[in-house]
Amino acid sequence: MDDDSQLVARAQTGDQKAFAELVRRYRDRVFRLAVSILGKEFVPEAEDVAQEVFLKIHHSLQSFRGEAQFGSWIYRITFNHAVNVKERARFRSPHVEETALREVASSSPGPEKQTEAAQRDRFLEECIQTLPELYQSALRQYYWLGTGIGEIAESLDVPENTVKSYLHRARKLLHGMLKERGISCD
Amino acid sequence: MTEMDPHDEEMDRFLLRSMKAPVPALPSNFDKQVLRAVNRNSDMVERYRRILFIAYAVVSAVTSVVIMRSAGLDWWPILGIVAPVTVITAALSTWKTKRARVEPSEA
């Protein structure tokens, strides 16, 4: 099987099959990185980001000189594009309304606990939104998407120890924020 | 993971519990959508390139004819210079376009 650099070289000469193989190899990782930056409420936007990233890649393939790894290049483009999309999406950021919380409460057993949990999750999501983008991405990739430290490190282009330190600092910050709001982590 | 203090461990468990949610995935036809969009984009770029090239060629030919006429050259020598250049350029352009169309299907 060809490695990335061989596929890139073939795609640069106009080989559609090589480009299709690159899309197949990176589609899920690009999508996971995009969704980890945008959050659960913006899955359709993350799909669009993934598609636009591949269009950008195809468009600028000729300018890729192979000084960096193809993976690092595509992840950097994804990260920047997702952050831009998030800036725009923030103005119409969906959030759970009180009425929706009441609906959850009335439709299932243990209404108080359900409401409490929903409220806590909403607060948690709000707190996560205030963290730096890199921390948010590392947190969502690790705790939500179940991505390993190694793959997170690759997608954020940092060493594994840095990812561990992002997670540690993010947990510390979140703990402080939740404590301030009187939310217990038990 | 590195050794965690009790608060960190508590937060780790809390996040594992609270952030648990269905993991989204891309639609199965995502690759096809991307390739279709790529082809659409390439076609558009190619069309603009062709329009730009033809416009440039026409302007160049007209300018050359005007300059040669103002230099006092007769129509026949002008035609003798411009016609072969035009024919060669048009032939090259057509050949390139045909090759570009054939290559993706061969790949």
Image: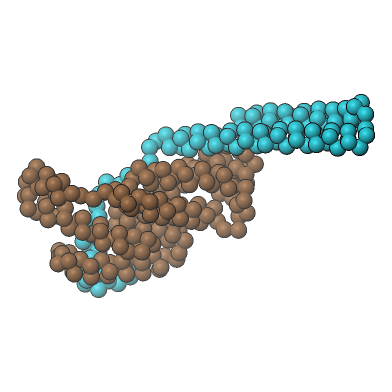
Chain colours: A brown, B cyan
Rendered location of residue A153, percent (x, y): 42, 61
Rendered location of residue A133, percent (x, y): 37, 61
Q: Nearer the viewer, residue A75 or B54?
A: B54
Q: Nearer the viewer, residue A137 or A83?
A: A83
Q: Residue furthest top?
A: B76
- Total marks shown come to 0
The quadrant the C terminus of chain A occupies is bottom left
Q: Is residue A133 left or right of residue B97?
A: left
Tell me which residue sits at (32%, 47%) in the image.
A42
Give residue B82's quadrant in the image.
Answer: top right
Q: Nearer the viewer, residue A88 or A22?
A: A88
Residue B106 in sight here: no
Rendered location of residue A143, percent (x, y): 29, 57
Tell me which residue sits at (36%, 64%) in the image.
A132
Rendered location of residue B52, percent (x, y): 67, 36
Q: Is residue B65 left or right of residue A139?
A: right
Tell me which residue sits at (50%, 33%) in the image.
B36
